[in-house]
Amino acid sequence: MIIGDAILSLSKSQQKLPDFQAIEQMSRQRSGSLTRIAIALMTFRDAEKQRREAECKVHRLAYFDTLTQLPNWQLMREHLQHSLDTSQQTETYGALIYLDVDDFNRINDSCGHRMGDNLLQQIAERLTGLKVEGITMGRLGGDEFMVIIDGLASEQLEAAEKAEAFAEQLQRTLSPCYWVEDKSIFLV
C-alpha cells in the first residue's frame, strides 16, 4: 500500500514531491524486493526533484531578466498580446508605458558597468515596489523598461485619465535620487 501511494504521488507532476519517510525506512532494510523497490522510488524522487528544479531554472532564464528579476522582453511580449486580446474581448482600454533611462550610456561609460547594473537594479526595485493591481512591469533590455496596464476603463477618456495618473505616480517613484557606490545619481 505504501509503495502504491508513493508511485501515485510521483505521477502527479503538479503536486509537491512527497517526503517518503516510510519509503526511506524501507530502503534501509538489509535486503528483499521491497527494499530494492524503495531504493528505486527514492532514486526516482530525487531525479524528479532535479528535473523540476531544472525546468524552473529554464523557465526563469527564458522569461525573466537575470539582472533585475523582472519579466523580460519575451514574457512582456506574450503578456502584451494577452492584454490586447483581453481588452478587445472585455471592451476595456489599457495602456503601455515605455521607460528609457536618460544618459544611461554616460553613467555606464563614466562610472562602469557595475554601477550601471546597480542603478538598473534599483530602478527595478522601485518599480516592483509599486503595488498596483492590473499592471505588469518588465525590462526589455539595456536601460529600457515597459509597463502594461490592463483594464483601466471602458470609456476612453476615463482610461486616459487613469493612465496619466499612474504615469505621474511612476514618475514620482522613479525621480528621487539614486545612491550607487556612494554617488548620487538623478534621473530626469
Image (spheres, helix red, strand yellow):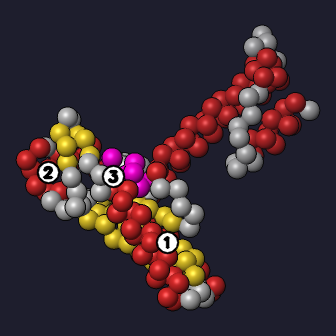
Which residue sits at x=55%, y=41%? Answer: 53
Quick one: 97 or 45, which is closer to the camera?
97
> Badge 2: few (under 14), some or many (20 or more) residues near its Cα, within 10 Å?
some
Under tag 3, what secondary structure? helix
Res 166 seen here: yes
Q: Mark 2 points at which residue?
A: 107
Q: Earlier in the sequence, mark 2 or mark 3?
A: 2
Q: Is residue 122 magenta?
A: yes
In percent of width and height, residue 34 lies at 83, 23
* In this view, 7 is above or below 147: above
Left or right relative to 157: residue 38: right
Which residue of the protein is positioned furthest toward the right in this rendering? 1
- Bounds of the magenta segment: 121-128
Which residue sits at x=42%, y=63%? Answer: 169
Residue 103 appears in which quarter of the rendering? bottom left
Q: Which of marks 2 and 1 is nearer the N terminus?
A: 2
Q: Give the residue type at disc 1.
A: Ile
State the predominant SS element of the stretch in magenta.
helix
Q: Give the residue type at disc 3.
A: Ile
Left or right relative to 113: residue 169: right
Q: Which of marks 3 and 1 is nearer the N terminus?
A: 3
Which residue sits at x=33%, y=52%? Answer: 123
Q: Mark 3 points at which residue?
A: 123
Badge number at residue 149 = 1
Which part of the image, by quadrant, shows the C terminus? bottom left
Q: Give the residue type at disc 2.
A: Ile
Which residue of the protein is positioned furthest toward the left in this rendering? 110
In percent of width and height, residue 76 lies at 44, 67
Q: How far apart are marks 2 and 1 (CA)?
A: 30 Å
